[in-house]
Image (tube, grey):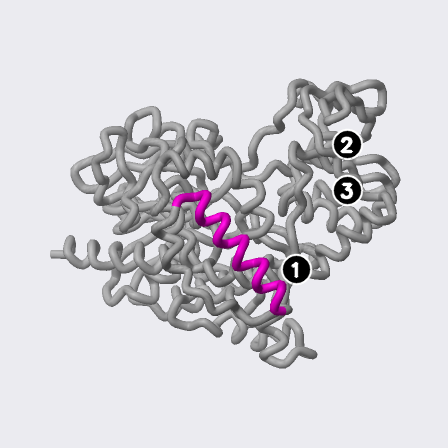
Amino acid sequence: MAYNRRMTDSSRNGELDLAIIGGGAAGVLVAIQVLRQATSALSLAIVEPASQLAQGIAYATLWPEHLLNVPAAKMSAFPDLPGDFLDYLQQVAAYPQDTREQLGERFVSRHHYAAYLQQRLQEAADASAAQLQVIAQPVLGLQPDDHGHRLQLGDGQVLHAAQTVLACGNSMRPLPLAGAEALPAGVVLDAWDYDGVRTLAGAQSVAIIGSGLSMADTVLALVAGGHTGTLQVFSRHGLLPLPHAHGALPTFDPQPLLAMTLRQRMRTLSGHAQRAEAAGQPWQGVMDRIRPMGQALWRSLDEADQRRFLRHVVRYWDIHRHRIAEPVHAQLQALQARGQLRVQRARLQHVQAQGAALQLVGHTAAGQQQWAVQALVNATGVETRARSLRNPLLQQLLADGLARPGGHGLGLDSVADGDRVLDAHGRTQPRLGVLGSLRIGTLWESLAVPELRQQAQALATQAVAGAATAMP
């Protein structure tokens, strides 16, 4: 993104009305909304160490084979402008052969979405009464004071913000096997190191740990790079993402689900899926019918049923809920059919280097097994356990009691009907907001754009109102 003079940190102002910590999609969505809503010269900053905004984990890839997992028509940045992403795609002629209807149904390359958010941020900054800075530093610490927060930056400087929003994004889970840290550099990569993964393409055998969406990204990148070697996917349950499908939504009323137990819900949804398929409609429509109720479905479960969901259901839920484009699914099936992609249902224990190879050891239904590969990719997905988050700021907040883990130890606890962080004693912190994956324990459905844009709009409204109240 070509920042204009109003959006650089060369004239950094340490006194802010709002600091947004994190410059991925979530943070940029908040900034856009604040800029659009502001009617006075409030000051805000996106504090993000990466060189580009809107390129968090999902949208940092430039490879065209990495597609959105949602049709373009559903990806607008604005709740009140549902066609805005389509407007952008047509403006830049991203897919000139498509009609608008065809474009809306297309799963477009993810790099288009980063460019879209960057453009909308630039436009909002140019037109806004507010003043935006982009500060290319990590935030290492946060301390409250009488006027808001003091933010300790990586370069030693301190910012003062009347309000702060945590939009810190995602980190990868660590590899669930011993010995990985002792392996030589270059043979173990994260699936989110998109360029690094591409360099593994060749004739060697590659192990991919995890079988979800990050696995699909890894396989697509390697195959597009000309990989001819075996791809061994390791997963305790051996479940791969399922495809989207076209079809009308079922007409059943989903509201009664909210009063049901987890077991009753699963039986009811299974029945709806069977009836849909019997009527010639895809089962995917059942999941799409209840999609807007995701947060309500989670919050209406009691704590015991939430635990049962996490222990017994979540792996099956995820492959039905977080689906992939039909062409991607077909490509994975074709790779399996010809034997290049092999899914190992196994519980891995450890890995060690043996000459030029890596030896993986684990258990399958047949007992202990060993596999020899030449490289290993961590595709275990998003780390959601609060105590395992690698971000030093989040660990400081937890250690100092300024935040506490969310339900079941997932994310940070927050006000369910708002967006304020709760401290270790359950007290609301009125100047500290949060959105995105850090709210998973409270809301469950909190990672995708439909949730992010709603949360961003609400956070911005509160931030603008707070700044107006504080002005003399």
User: Circle 3 sits in a helix, a strand or a loop, which is it?
Assistant: loop
Residue 199's mark?
3
Return the residue nearer the eye: 22 or 292.
292
Q: Is residue 163 magenta?
A: no
- In the picture, measured across the screen, residue 67 lies left or right of residue 202, that is left
Residue 375's mark?
2
Return the residue nearer the eye: 348 or 56.
348
Q: In the image, what residue type sits under mark 3? A: Thr
Q: CA distance from mark 1 to mark 3?
A: 25 Å
Q: Quadrant of the C terminus?
A: bottom left
Q: Which residues are magenta?
A: 261-279
Q: What residue do we see at 54% from left, 39% from top?
A: 382
Q: In the image, what residue type sits under mark 1? A: Ala
Return the residue nearer the eye: 463 or 220.
220
Residue 325's mark?
1
Dot 1 or dot 3, earlier in sequence:
3
Q: CA distance from mark 1 to mark 2?
A: 27 Å
Return the residue nearer the eye: 125 or 101.
101
User: Do the residues bearing badges 1 and 2 touch, measured as CB atoms within 8 Å?
Assistant: no
What is the x, y in percent for residue 44? 32, 53
Q: Is residue 271 magenta?
A: yes
Q: What residue do we see at 46% from left, 32% from top?
A: 385
Q: Is residue 155 visible?
A: no
What is the x, y in percent for residue 194? 67, 45
- In the picture, measured across the screen, residue 114 lies left or right of residue 418, that is right
Q: What residue do we see at 63% from left, 76% from top?
A: 102
Q: Say which of marks 3 and 2 sits in front.
A: 2
Against 370, residue 313 (above or below) is below
Against 349, residue 29 (above or below) is below
